[in-house]
Image (cartoon, helix red, strand yellow):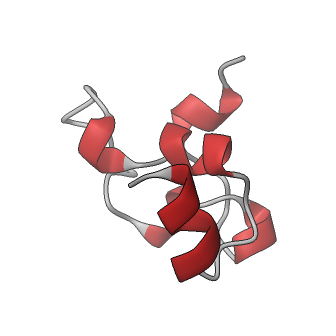
Amino acid sequence: MTKEHFETNTNWKMSYEEFQKCDCTHCDKKDCIHRNAFRRVPVIDGGLGLCPNLKES
């Protein structure tokens, strides 16, 4: 998803950079327990922010 599409066609409050980090379609961690679960989403959007990629700098 492009940044423009993200900003105009979604209701996420997280930044585009955060979206890219927690987007499971681009993640190599196939056995992640948070894969495709809403809990991976940042707290600002109602999730628990549990995606390991969000914790990495």
Asked whether, in this view, residue 2 is left or right of residue 25, the answer is right
Residue 19 lies, in percent from the top left, at 56, 51
Q: Position of residue 54 (x, y in %)?
A: 64, 36
Q: Residue 16: x, y in percent?
A: 63, 50
Identify whether 26 is placed above or below 14: above
Where does the C terminus fall, quadrant-wise? Answer: top right
Front residue (pair 20, 7): 7
Residue at 31 percent of width and 33 percent of height: 27
* Residue 44 in sight from this viewpoint: yes
What residue is at 53 percent from the left and 56 percent from the top? 40
Which residue reaches farthest right?
A: 44
The answer to whether any part of residue 39 appears in the image is no
Q: Quadrant of residue 11?
A: bottom right
Q: Quadrant of the N terminus?
A: bottom left
Residue toward you, 31 or 26: 26
Residue extending farthest top = 57
Instruction: Judge from the rendering whether residue 31 lies leftward or rightward of residue 24; answer left or right.
Output: left
